[in-house]
Image (cartoon, helix red, strand yellow):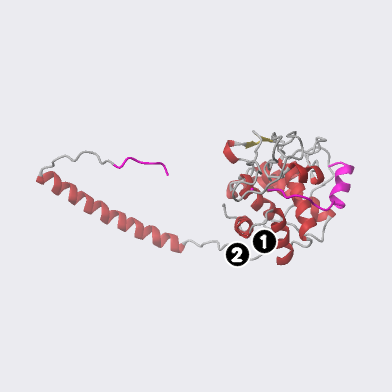
Amino acid sequence: MDAVTRRMVIAPEPPRGYPGPPPQWPDGRPPRRRRSRLRTFVGASFAIAVGIGVIAIASGLGEFDQARPRIEIPDDIPPGPGTPLPPIDVDAPGRTADQLRDWATPLSGTLGISPTALEAYGYAAAVMARSRPDCGIGWTTLAGIAAVESRHGTYLGARVAGDGQVSPPIRGIPLDGSPGVAVIPDTDGGAMDGDPVHDRAMGPLQFIPETWSRWGVDANGDGIADPDNIDDAALTAARYLCARGGDLTTEGGWRTALMAYNLSGEYLMDVRARAAAYSVGVRR
């Protein structure tokens, strides 16, 4: 992260805008065939035997499941901070988040999140821990948001590359005032979101162009603030949340930050549930 980015992280601007937004089976039955009494008897006996076996197996599995300790997911707000981050040099050149590979790799298999995405969340939290120690944002909160917004950059088959780039780019629906959708006329001429009529949310953390133009930062050292790069998007989200919520280690601060990100109580609780699960090592 360069000096310009560090200054932007330390002194954020006030935000404007917001970052985000059965198969029909035939009714007919197969033709019935006549069966002999003997075949019917054999079939019924076999079904009974199978049923008894299934019940016995299910009973055994139930006992096994009861014997296995369950991980309780806390319902606290804010969610827990999760596995602690190791010390890293947040000013190192290039993709500084690479320093978190040994931390992210074992968590990746447990949580079902790519190492690159976890590194991005961890790096963003590490940067804010130094530049805004009063905020206290955890990587779990960023992971919870990214899970809801884009499945950690994998929505509709997108993939996160080793440098953090998400492709194909993830774009939300046009913000055209449809039922349940805000009205946001185009602010970027379609240059970033590809829509010259209405704005659309962009990237793995789903920022609209106007918000990205104010808050977007380069977190991976390539000189570009790119909403389609999960490193850049995660640090930008962290800055935005800290500025809006203040102290995210308090319930009030965390709620305020999340409601600024998306004005929905249901959204807030969905993010909290996922972040809380990640905090205790449970995949969601």
Q: Quadrant of the N terminus?
A: top right
- Residue in front for this viewpoint, 177 or 126: 177
In the rendered image, residue 112 lying in the magenta stretch gets the answer: no
In the rendered image, residue 24 lying in the magenta stretch gets the answer: yes
Q: Is residue 180 above or below residue 256?
A: above
Query: What secondary structure is found at the residue carrying circle 2?
Result: loop
Residue visible at 65% across and 43% down in the picture: 176
Majority secondary structure in the magenta region: loop
Can you tell which quarter of the image residue 80 is in? Answer: bottom right
What separation in Å lies between label 1 and label 2 (alpha carbons)?
8 Å
From which residue to which does the magenta span run?
Answer: 1-27
Tag on residue 80? 1
- Residue in front for this viewpoint, 176 or 67: 176
Residue visible at 60% across and 65% down in the picture: 75
Q: How many neighbours does mark 1 have within 10 angstroms: few (below 14), some (14-19), or many (20 or more)?
A: many
Q: Residue furthest left?
A: 37
Image spot of residue 245 (x, y percent): 76, 60
Can you tell which quarter of the image residue 193 is in? Answer: top right
- Disc 1 residue type? Gly
Asked whether disc 1 touches disc 2, contact meaning CB atoms under 8 Å apart, the reply is: yes
Q: Which residue is mark 2?
A: 74
